[in-house]
Image: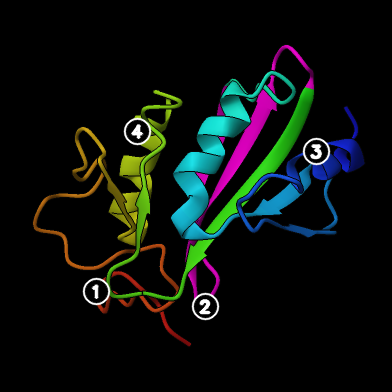
Amino acid sequence: MTNLELQELIGNWEFNLEFSEEESQFLNIHVPAEHLHNFMFRFKSDPETQFDYLFCLSGVDWGEKLGVVYHLESTTKRHMAVVKVATEDRENPTFETVYDIWATSEFHEREVFDFFGITFSNHPNLKRLFLTEDWIGYPLRKDYEDETNMILY
């Protein structure tokens, strides 16, 4: 299925999706946070899409927004897509976990929590993965400052 065919198919789903024409080989899909979990469940389970493989999950600080980017593949249909979700709530950024859809997301979501402070509701074990429990702040956010270890020009 081509990116255009995939876009036409899922564009009819009731999730208020937006698509971007970024320089990418993948279809880029922007999902409102309130629809993320239901969309992802359907994206995996629908017989026409079957996105059964989550091969990358990354946190992103876009400046005014924090978000998560999911790279997905259907190993049976042989198509790929990028799903993006964002929030302007930098004080309490929260998205629904996709752990119950793709178990591999457990450690990816913990890493995003650790470095960006994004929480995933209903995650089975959301705690720091790399940093110590007493660490203050989120080192991959653009507004993070560490006076001891950072060199500022």
Magenta: main secondary structure equals: strand
Gap between marks 3 and 4, in whole Å?
31 Å
Q: Secondary structure at mark 2?
A: loop
Outermost residue to the bottom? 153
* Earlier-in-chain disc, 3 versus 4: 3
Q: Is residue 9 magenta?
A: no
Q: Is residue 58 magenta?
A: yes
Q: Which residues are magenta?
A: 53-78
Depth check, front residue: 64 or 3 = 3
Gap between marks 2 and 1, in whole Å?
23 Å
Which dot marks residue 107?
4
Which dot marks residue 41?
none
Residue type at the position of mark 4:
Phe
Residue type at the position of mark 2:
Gly
Residue receiving disc 3: 9
Gap between marks 3 and 2, in whole Å?
32 Å
Q: Secondary structure at mark 4?
A: helix
Determine crowd level at label 3: few under 14, some 14-19, many 20+ residues with C-alpha closer than 10 A: few
The answer to whether residue 94 of the structure is visible from this angle is: yes
* Earlier-in-chain disc, 1 versus 3: 3
Residue receiving disc 1: 148
Q: Secondary structure at mark 1?
A: loop
Between marks 1 and 3 in the image, the one whose residue lies nearer the viewer: 3
Side (left or right) of 149 relative to 82 = left
Residue receiving disc 2: 63
Residue type at the position of mark 1:
Thr
Q: Are marks 1 and 3 in contact (CB under 8 Å)?
A: no
* Earlier-in-chain disc, 3 versus 2: 3
